[in-house]
Image (spheres, rainbow, N blue to C red):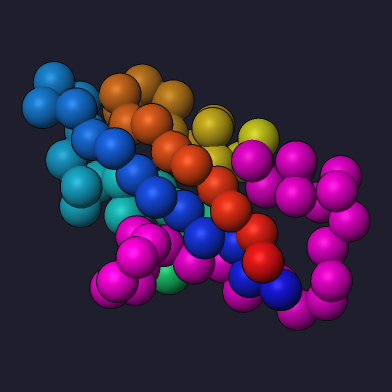
Amino acid sequence: MNTYLTLWFSSEGASPLEVKKELETIGFRPVQGGYDFVYFWQEKPSVTDLLALGDSIQKALTGSQTMFKMESV
């Protein structure tokens, strides 16, 4: 299973390169195409694992004025 992120940046917030650096610290990789970043799970995550990842994303993006959409498939 993978978790994909789509991001929306604000011109008043952090730069895309700053956001990339923050997301890479929690294990996301930038990708091209329909999504902006992907997280590769080693094992099938539980719902709690997915929510915990969402919490980590929120903490990483706090103050950046960047919104995100998370999709796990």
Q: Which residues are magenta?
A: 30-54
Is 40 within the magenta?
Answer: yes
Residue at (16% x, 40% y) in the render: 15
Residue at (65% x, 35% y) in the render: 55
Residue at (20% x, 47% y) in the render: 16
Against 30, residue 6 (above or below) is above
Q: How many marks overall?
A: 0
Q: Quadrant of residue 10?
A: top left
* The one of 53 and 36 positioned closer to us in this rendering: 36
Q: Quadrant of residue 52?
A: top right
15 to the left or right of 38:
left
Give residue 30's position: percent from left, percent from top: 35, 68
Q: Quadrant of residue 66?
A: top left
25 to the left or right of 13:
right
68 to the left or right of 59:
left
Give residue 46's position: percent from left, percent from top: 89, 56
* The one of 67 and 27 positioned closer to us in this rendering: 67
Against 32, residue 61 (above or below) is above
Does residue 27 appear in this view?
no
Q: Quadrant of the N terminus?
A: bottom right
From this viewpoint, which residue is outermost toward the bottom? Answer: 42
Residue at (86% x, 45% y) in the render: 48
Is 23 within the magenta?
Answer: no
Does residue 30 appear in this view?
yes
Against 41, residue 49 (above or below) is above
Against 58, residue 72 (above or below) is below
From this viewpoint, which residue is outermost toward the left? Answer: 11
Q: Quadrant of the C terminus?
A: bottom right
